[in-house]
């Protein structure tokens, strides 16, 4: 059984989420948004954290490409 | 499950929030489609071909439990009882998870069984197996219905879809990804979901902490100082005497309920069974224990904060119920008050993902037990593997349809006692099962007849306690608050199971030793219980015992700091 690498999916999803949030944080944050979150640009900071998470998973997948045991013999059915 | 308040809970979700939600579900369905390509046998579908690395199964292990009841129930408990809620994590989960990894996993994984009931069959024979398989299947469908209902309530309150539509849509999405990809898809999504939940709750906690003035702000603002310490948790247990409250916590929650839940609940154990090696299987629950020990920070603290800064919640806590909110509404209320569009979409996604994963975990463990333990053993034997793969897929469809039915039952029951009901279910099924397991694993003389008689005796004891304490049945011989009754029911079920099993064993015939190798501690050679320490399993940081000791130490330190 061949499994695709889950780390790349995590990297993809959070990369996308992170970039969208950073763009909102930089470009589309209103004073009202800031007031709601006690003056913190939470979209920006959360976006940056997600981009970092994405990069960590992408780097891990690049450096250690093997993910699941793909060459295992099928187990004997009981 | 309380009905969320009509008007105020509606979140102000914008197009960007919906877009983030849609992206998530496209990815989730994509995983199902991709996983389908790699499924070529029933073992692939139902146990992921036993090929997953430990960090994946470990996170899935914890995520399978991070469903509606956990997120809604524990944030609600945080708001209502404060720090005492940490017991559900630190006493109520960590020791049992370490025990599962170090002591029980060698038998589960080493004996190559595909499900918990299958272990019962090999240790005790068919009657015990049938009792266990049927009760498990029934329990999973009931719980899946409750999860589905909770999911639908949230969709309804957040996005404004009518309840029946939400229930069916939620069931369809779960159905789509589990039938397509089987357990791999469910597990992959659970891991993904874990990160999305953290991404949803961490910003909420941080903004909440800033608003309330940090930990110092919490300490200053909480009016009932007892809620800032975890012991003796008299409010949580409903037991007024502090000494008995602690005993109730340690024995009832910490030992019987928690060990029963974590070590025999197949929806959890299945995640470890799909690991790629004995070492990875042992590490699965232990790796899961680390995030489990730390996650109260982003679940309980928001609950405590909500009681301080959300006006409706503070009003409720002061005893005024006219605000139309319940403790269950903590997360939606905090999201409404603290999160701007964008991150709000992530938070909605996290909640929906979590509730959906709960249903998926119930469904995927149901179909394994149904296919292998009921259909293959009692209905159609000796068919080719493709036949059982097809049955596995059909069982998934059946489970989703049945869960829609039980979701409507849960919706009809309504009320606010779903959590008590769930705890009662655990006392029926998990507490006696744990007693039978632990006795059967360490006492080779225990007979097959004792296996099923003890199980039934324990289950009926717990049902009896529930029947005489649940107010709506009108018998009321026993007056205990909701949680207290299930602690007592679980404890008694455990004791009765042990006593009955021992008594029956004395008068019935044990199995010959040769049939118990690999299933009973004293008859399993040490090498069979050991894990390899080479290749992918090498390195001191992959030692299950060391990792287990580490998380126990971490939990002790956390108790010293926050207890």
Image (cartoon, coloured by chain):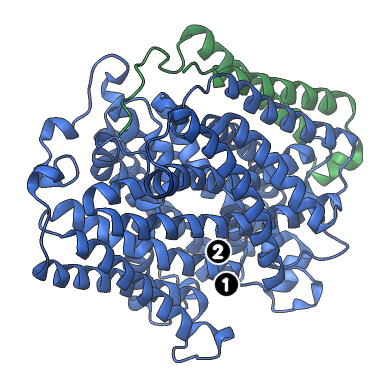
Chain colours: A green, B blue
Can marks 2 and 1 be said to lie on one chain? yes
Q: Residue B379, image x and y in percent?
A: 43, 48
Whether the residues at callouts 2 and 1 have beta carbons within 8 Å, the answer is yes
Q: Residues within 10 Å of mark 1 (few under 14, many from 20)?
A: few
Q: Nearer the viewer, residue A32 or B201?
A: B201
* Residue positioned 47% across, 88% down in the render: B479
Mark 2 Cα shell of 10 Å, populated few (<14), some (14-19), many (≥20):
many
- Above or below — where is A51 with respect to B24? above
Lateral position of residue B127 relative to residue B144, left or right: left
Q: Secondary structure at mark 1?
A: loop
Task: Tell which tag, 2 or 1, sits nearer the viewer.
Answer: 2
Q: Residue at x 43, y 58 (%)?
A: B134
Q: Is B261 rendered above or below residue B455? A: above
Which residue is under mark 2? B82
Residue B329 image position (x, y, % from top left): 71, 61
Q: From mark 2 to mark 1, how far is it between C-alphas?
A: 9 Å
Where the N terminus of chain B falls, by quadrant? bottom right
């Amino acid at each position: 059984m061949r499994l695709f690498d889950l780390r790349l999916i995590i990297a993809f999803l959070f990369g996308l989420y992170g970039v969208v949030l950073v763009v909102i944080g930089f470009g589309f944050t209103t004073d009202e948004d800031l007031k709601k979150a006690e003056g913190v640009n939470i979209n920006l900071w959360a976006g940056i954290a997600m981009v970092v998470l994405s990069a960590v998973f992408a780097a891990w997948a690049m450096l250690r490409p093997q993910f699941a045991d793909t060459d295992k013999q099928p187990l004997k059915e009981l | 499950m309380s009905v969320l308040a009509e008007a105020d809970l509606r979140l102000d979700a914008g197009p960007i929030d919906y877009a983030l939600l849609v992206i998530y579900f496209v990815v989730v369905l994509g995983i199902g489609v991709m996983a389908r390509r790699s499924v070529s046998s029933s073992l692939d579908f139902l146990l992921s071909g036993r090929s997953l690395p430990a960090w994946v199964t470990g996170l899935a292990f914890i995520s399978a439990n991070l469903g509606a009841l956990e997120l809604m129930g524990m944030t609600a408990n945080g708001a209502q009882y404060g720090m005492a809620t940490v017991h559900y994590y630190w006493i109520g989960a960590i020791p049992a998870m370490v025990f599962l990894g170090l002591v029980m996993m060698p038998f589960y994984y080493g004996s190559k069984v595909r499900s918990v009931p299958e272990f019962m069959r090999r240790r005790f024979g068919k009657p015990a197996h049938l009792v266990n398989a049927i009760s498990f299947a029934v329990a999973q469908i009931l719980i899946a219905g409750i999860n589905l209902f909770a999911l639908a309530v949230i969709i309804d309150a957040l996005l404004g879809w009518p309840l029946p539509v939400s229930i069916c849509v939620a069931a369809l999405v779960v159905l789509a990804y589990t039938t397509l990809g089987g357990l791999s898809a469910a597990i992959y999504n659970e891991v993904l979901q874990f990160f999305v939940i953290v991404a949803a709750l961490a910003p909420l906690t941080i903004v909440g902490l800033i608003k309330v003035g940090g930990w110092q702000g919490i300490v200053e603002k909480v009016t009932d100082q007892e809620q800032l310490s975890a012991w003796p948790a008299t409010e949580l247990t409903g037991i007024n005497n502090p000494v008995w409250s602690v005993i109730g916590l340690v024995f009832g929650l910490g030992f019987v309920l928690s060990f029963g839940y974590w070590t025999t609940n197949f929806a959890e154990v299945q995640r470890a069974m799909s690991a790629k090696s004995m070492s990875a299987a042992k590490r699965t629950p232990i790796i899961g224990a680390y995030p489990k020990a730390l996650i109260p920070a982003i679940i309980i603290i928001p609950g405590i904060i909500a009681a301080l800064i959300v006006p409706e919640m503070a009003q409720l806590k002061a005893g005024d119920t006219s605000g139309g909110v319940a403790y269950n509404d903590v997360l939606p209320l905090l999201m409404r008050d603290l999160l701007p569009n964008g991150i709000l979409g992530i938070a909605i996604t996290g909640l929906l993902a979590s509730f959906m994963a709960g249903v998926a975990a119930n469904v995927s463990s149901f179909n394994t037990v149904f296919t292998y333990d009921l259909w293959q053993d009692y209905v159609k034997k000796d068919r080719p593997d493709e036949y059982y793969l097809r049955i596995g897929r059909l069982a998934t469809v059946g489970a989703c349809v049945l869960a829609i039915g039980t979701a409507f039952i849960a919706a009809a029951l309504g009320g606010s006692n779903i959590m008590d009901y769930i705890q009662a279910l655990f006392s029926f099924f998990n507490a006696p099962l744990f007693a039978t397991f632990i006795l059967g694993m360490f006492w080779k003389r225990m007979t097959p007849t004792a296996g099923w008689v003890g199980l039934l005796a324990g289950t009926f004891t717990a049902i009896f306690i529930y029947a005489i304490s649940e107010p709506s049945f009108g018998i009321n011989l026993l007056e205990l608050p909701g949680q207290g009754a299930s602690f007592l029911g679980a404890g008694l079920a455990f004791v009765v199971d042990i006593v009955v099993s021992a008594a029956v064993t004395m008068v019935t015939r044990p199995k010959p030793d040769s049939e118990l190798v690999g299933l009973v501690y004293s008859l399993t050679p040490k090498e069979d219980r050991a894990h390899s320490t080479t290749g992918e399993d090498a390195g001191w940081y992959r030692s299950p015992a060391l990792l287990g000791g580490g998380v126990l130490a971490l939990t002790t330190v956390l108790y010293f700091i926050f207890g």
